[in-house]
Amino acid sequence: MTEILKNIHLSFIWFHPVVDHWRKYMKLPPAVSFMASSTDLAQKIYLKTCITIQDNLTLPWPWIDKDEKNNKFYQNHFWQEHLESTNYWELEAKVYERYLVPLREDPDCQLSAEGFTGEIASEVFYFPFGVAFVLSAIYHSSSGSSFPQAITLFQKLRHEAEWTLAWDKINSSKPLKLDLLGQNVLGLLVERILGTGAAANLKPVKPFSLFTVVQGEYDPPQVEKDGGDIHHYLHAMTEWSITWMSDALPDLAQASVKRPGRPASHIIYTGKNGLAIWFPGLFNPINDTQSYLSCYHRNQLFSALFVQSLSGFLCETAKVLAANRQPVLLERECAESAAKLIGRIYGGEQDTYRSRCARKTIDQSGWIKDINLVRKTFHMDDLH
């Protein structure tokens, strides 16, 4: 049976470490004073759980106002596991600090991409040690498209489409390609914190991508064929090669995350800069407004966000250590917490959100040496 894809979620993650305010003992503007330390940011998050503050900053987990006196939160599996609590929205500030919980911003912006008629959403996450920008595109079609058609659409979005963004100091009357868009947003965020000119040397970086087919129609074989069509399709959506139809493929088993007890036709395909999730047995929605795979995509997005952000920060701190210098106190404290967290995530500990994807991403990234250097400084074992 030819696959028919009706709902697809694609997210891109950019991260940039921000630590110069610690290294240069800078006083921050009032609007971002919560970035002064991990304690200040955790306190801001704690206040957000207690009272309503009118700004664009939000808690990182989804929630709704049930009434004026009662905030009703949706249970989110990632945060429940990450914070080791079913009531993760009512913890003390010191817990949010220990687990380096970020503050989320819902940007008041206008964002569009040439030739894409689906939904586009953007989010900003403020970690104590840096900033992340997340851009998500959602494709809906009642009639659906074939996988090659979807790949063509998203490859254009990734490589060729011209994006326009109006937000704060960015007003791109001249459209931007995706990499440059990410660079401009990160530059804006860095300069919000460190001041004008702080992002002058910022260079474009490739984002990490997460691709999930949420709904569709497909009668999968018992086992997908190594080198078959689905293998080519998933490779295209992680490596983003424009020659994906003719590219040599890695072994499917080696490129996939093993999930014991799951159908062999279900695949999480990993690349150096992306993940693709293909679970055709779960295409049916939970109800009219929610599907298992949309929730799974969100959980994996948070997991990838932490992996990219923690690792990016630890690699920055490793530069200091490699030069036989010691990080300043606030950076050192954050680096110790980050080194502990990345170890929990990598090891798939019971007291964290367990995703084999996270370990695979770290293994393929080239970060291991730098992460281990920081962990060794705090007398922790190497990841491997």
Image (cartoon, rainbow, N blue to C red):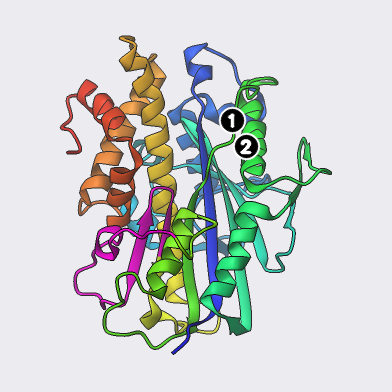
Within 10 Å of disc 1 (Cα), the crowding (few <14, some 14-19, many 20+) is some
Residue 313 lies, in percent from the top left, at: 41, 31
**Left or right: 78, with 205 as reference point:** left
**Viewer-nearest residue: 333 or 213:** 213
Task: State the residue at coordinates (52%, 45%).
Answer: 207
**Side of 106 relative to 207 (left or right):** right
Position of the N terminus, as image quadrant, is bottom left
Question: Magenta region: which residues?
Answer: 247-276
Q: Does residue 82 sit above or below 35 in this rendering?
A: below
- Going from N to C along the chain, the mark reached first, 1 or 2, is 2
In the image, what residue occupies the spot 52% across and 60% down?
Answer: 62
Position in image of residue 77 (x %, y %): 37, 62
- Secondary structure mainly formed by the magenta segment: loop
Labels 1 & 2 near each other (Cβ < 8 A):
yes
Please name whichever residue, 368 or 85, is drawn nearer the observer in this view of the structure: 368
Label 2 sits on residue: 183
Image mark for residue 203: 1
Q: Secondary structure at mark 2?
A: helix
Above or below, 342 relative to 59: above
Q: Is residue 156 visible?
A: yes
In this image, 238 relative to 356: left or right? right
**Which residue sits furthest right?**
173
Is residue 250 on the magenta stretch? yes
